[in-house]
């Protein structure tokens, strides 16, 4: 029993090592964009954005609606929309909706909306941005919405929520480095909880649950600089070429070598943007022969050169 438990823990740690590497490379950046006490009736509409957003019921219940469904959110529940779909939140489904920008601006100016009458709700809303130029299968593997219920007061997730709430009240502001970092921590905690608690995952997240595929991903993430070939990957993973190609394609819709190439370029993007390393040094770190080869692959993949990214000219 102890041996089985240790094996399960080791597998879980390996899964989260890969996940943490992906999260670090995508460089998620958190922020709180709305935090207020509200008096019913109230309602807020949120436009689509290419970033994950979440809503927390600090006090009172509310409803969230998307184009597909409506969900009741109870006090101490958290609901996340990883794909940033258009949605609304309100005390009741019939409540009139105000645009999020208007509600947020009113809070910033110290004149929050929905304050007339008895306070029925207290909510906190956050978002997590990332470098959209970088693509990764994890973004496609997340559902359009997931709902966290039965969060206990002493759970680390709710401890982080309380810390964010306390910091906002202490500073009377939603904008600070501490709040942003805590928001990122909360996002990672929610992502880890979603993976740990859900049996029916797909895509990249399902691949992390497959021991053979997880081993391949661990190899590539631990050592992207190695001169990998399909043959060496198969040898390390103990799989035939046909089996590896088939399983990898089924879960990630990519070949192992295509995934490796995309991952190397994601690492290159962040090293170019956020370090002072030379392109030759970066090429050496991620498995390219030299700077010239990396430069060509980088421009072909992203549509702009490493030097343009470093100078901030990549959006021109």
Image: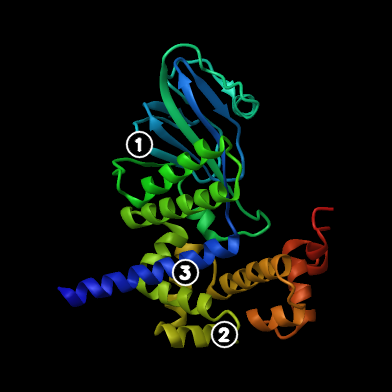
- Judged from the image, the secondary structure of the residue bearing numbered disc 3 is helix
- Tell me whether the residue at label 1 lies in contact with that at label 3, contact meaning CB atoms closer than 8 angstroms: no
Distance from Cα at disc 1 to Cα at disc 3: 30 Å
| Mark 1 neighbour density, 10 Å: few (under 14) some (14–19) many (20 or more) | many
The quadrant holding residue 131 is bottom right
Q: Is residue 211 above or below residue 70?
A: below
Labels 2, 3: front one: 3
Residue in the image at 52% along x and 15% along y = 96
Quarter-of-image position of residue 269: bottom right
- Above or below for 225 versus 14: below
Determine the residue located farthest toward the top in the rendered image: 117
In the depicted structure, whether residue 211 falls above or below residue 171: below
Seen as rendered, the residue at the extreme front is: 170
Give the left or right position of residue 80, taking residue 309 as reference: left
| Camera-nearest label, 1 or 3 | 1
In the picture, the quarter occupied by the N terminus is bottom left
User: Which element is circle 2 on?
Assistant: loop
Marking on residue 76? 1
Q: Position of residue 259 (x, y in %)?
A: 57, 70
Question: Secondary structure beneath disc 1?
Answer: loop
Residue at 37 percent across and 70 percent down: it is 13
What is the total number of numbered labels drawn onto the structure image?
3
| Relative horizontal placement of residue 120, taking residue 101 as reference (left or right) | left
């Amino acid at each position: 029993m102890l041996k089985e438990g240790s094996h399960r823990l080791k597998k879980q740690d390996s899964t989260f090592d890969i996940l943490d590497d992906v999260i670090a490379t995508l460089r998620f950046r958190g922020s709180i964009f709305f935090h207020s006490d509200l008096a019913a009736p109230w309602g807020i509409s949120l436009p689509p954005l290419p970033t994950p957003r979440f809503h927390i019921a600090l006090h009172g219940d509310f409803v969230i609606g998307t184009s597909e469904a409506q969900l009741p959110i109870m006090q101490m529940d958290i609901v996340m929309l990883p794909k940033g779909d258009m949605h609304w939140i309100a005390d009741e489904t019939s409540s009139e909706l105000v645009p999020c920008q208007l509600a947020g601006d009113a809070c910033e100016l110290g004149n929050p909306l929905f304050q007339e009458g008895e306070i029925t709700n207290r909510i906190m809303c956050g978002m997590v941005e990332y470098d959209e130029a970088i693509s990764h299968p994890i973004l496609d593997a997340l559902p359009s919405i997931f709902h966290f219920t039965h969060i206990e007061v002493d759970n680390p997730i709710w401890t982080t929520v309380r810390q964010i709430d306390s910091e906002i009240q202490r500073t009377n502001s939603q904008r600070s480095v501490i709040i942003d970092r805590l928001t990122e921590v909360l996002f990672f905690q929610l992502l880890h909880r979603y993976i740990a608690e859900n049996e029916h995952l797909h895509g990249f997240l399902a691949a992390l649950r497959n021991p053979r595929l997880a081993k391949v991903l661990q190899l590539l993430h631990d050592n992207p600089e190695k001169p990998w070939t399909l043959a060496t990957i198969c040898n390390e993973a103990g799989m035939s070429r046909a089996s590896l190609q088939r399983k990898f394609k089924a879960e990630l819709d990519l070949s192992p070598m295509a995934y490796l190439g995309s991952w190397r370029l994601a690492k290159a993007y962040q090293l170019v943007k956020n370090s002072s390393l030379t392109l030759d040094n970066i090429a050496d770190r991620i498995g390219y022969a030299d700077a010239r080869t990396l430069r060509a692959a980088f421009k072909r993949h992203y549509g702009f050169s490493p030097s343009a990214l470093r100078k901030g000219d990549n959006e021109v």
